[in-house]
Image (cartoon, rainbow, N blue to C red):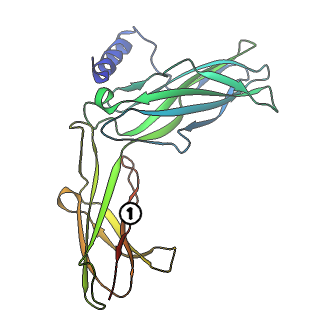
């Protein structure tokens, strides 16, 4: 059974009272608190078209008696719902026994978990923290992160070699994962920067910005002045991570 079907069943069960609904806001008893939430280190999880992606969610919590255990799950757009691969583990700080970091590992397989692109966007961490003295704290939105469609960017500059002062054509394509078709598709009407790095330099300089066209295609022209590398770079959006093409070296004669 595909997970999307499971998500729909979960939503229906919640509406009927068969499952506990995610807490709409923070609630608790005593002095238990959540002080920090991190997802995959940077708050973004990029998923391609094949292969499972495993990432970690870490929730830091505190209580004057210490943290006993934690439970959390993830929910997102279009009934998105993920549970940890195994029991969440809490480890007390070496310098402060009242504070613990509880970590859970999650796995997403686009071929199983997503039937379309609707789950791309903002996801939330729902967390329940139990303290050793019976206190607790729960939040349906303890933290958030972006579930993104992995992107790719290519570049090709021609002709190679080229005479100094002549026109150089630089093309490329910006694509991103389509979870519905399990293939990469063009990302249209998105700004990409054309950058150049001189042969004797370690720094790229932006020459111009070009919007992607049909099937994510990029094309522009520049005047060849000296040897160096050309590349396209894309800053990313809320549903798509940044991407940078590998530099294409041009010999100017």
Q: How many marks?
A: 1
**Percent of width and height locating residue 235:** 41, 59
> Taking the image as drawn, is residue 25 in sight?
no
Up-down relation of residue 47 to residue 65 (above or below): below
The quadrant of the picture occupied by the N terminus is top left
Residue at x-position 48% and y-position 40%: 145
Question: For this rendering, which residue is in front, 100 or 14?
Answer: 100
The quadrant of the picture occupied by the C terminus is bottom left
Question: For this rendering, which residue is in front, 159 or 41?
Answer: 159
Up-down relation of residue 173 to residue 88 (above or below): below
**Percent of width and height locating residue 215:** 19, 56
**Percent of width and height locating residue 80:** 36, 28
Residue at x-position 31% and y-position 36%: 50
Residue at x-position 20% and y-position 38%: 181
Question: For this rendering, which residue is in front, 66 or 214?
Answer: 214
Residue at x-position 39% and y-position 55%: 236
Up-down relation of residue 65 to residue 42 (above or below): above
**With 116 as the anchor, is 13 left or right in this view?**
right
**With 238 as the anchor, is 90 left or right in this view?**
right
**Percent of width and height locating residue 185:** 22, 49
**With 171 as the anchor, is 25 left or right in this view?**
right
Mark 1 element type? loop
Quadrant in the picture for residue 193: bottom left
Q: Which residue is mark 1?
A: 246
């Amino acid at each position: 059974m595909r997970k999307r079907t499971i998500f729909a069943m979960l939503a229906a069960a919640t509406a009927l009272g068969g499952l506990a609904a995610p807490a709409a806001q923070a609630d608790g008893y005593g002095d238990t608190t959540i002080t920090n939430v991190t997802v995959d280190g940077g708050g973004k999880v990029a998923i391609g078209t094949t292969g499972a992606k495993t990432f970690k969610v870490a929730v830091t919590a505190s209580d004057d008696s210490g943290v006993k255990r934690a439970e959390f799950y993830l929910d997102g757009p279009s009934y998105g719902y993920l549970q940890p691969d195994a029991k969440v583990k809490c480890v007390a700080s070496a310098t402060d026994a009242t504070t613990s970091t509880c970590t859970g590992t999650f796995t997403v397989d686009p071929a199983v978990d997503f039937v379309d692109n609707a789950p791309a966007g903002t996801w939330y961490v729902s967390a329940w923290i139990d303290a050793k003295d019976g206190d607790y704290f729960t939040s349906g939105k303890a933290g958030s992160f972006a579930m993104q469609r992995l992107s790719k960017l290519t570049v090709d500059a021609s002709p190679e070699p080229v005479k100094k002062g002549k026109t150089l054509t630089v093309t490329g394509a910006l694509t991103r994962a389509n979870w519905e078709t399990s293939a990469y598709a063009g990302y249209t009407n998105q700004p990409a920067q054309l950058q150049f790095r001189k042969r004797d330099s370690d720094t790229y300089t932006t020459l111009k910005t070009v919007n992607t066209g049909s099937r994510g295609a990029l094309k522009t022209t520049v005047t060849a002045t000296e040897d160096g590398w050309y590349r396209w770079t894309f800053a990313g959006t809320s549903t798509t991570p940044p991407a940078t093409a590998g530099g294409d070296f041009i010999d100017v004669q």
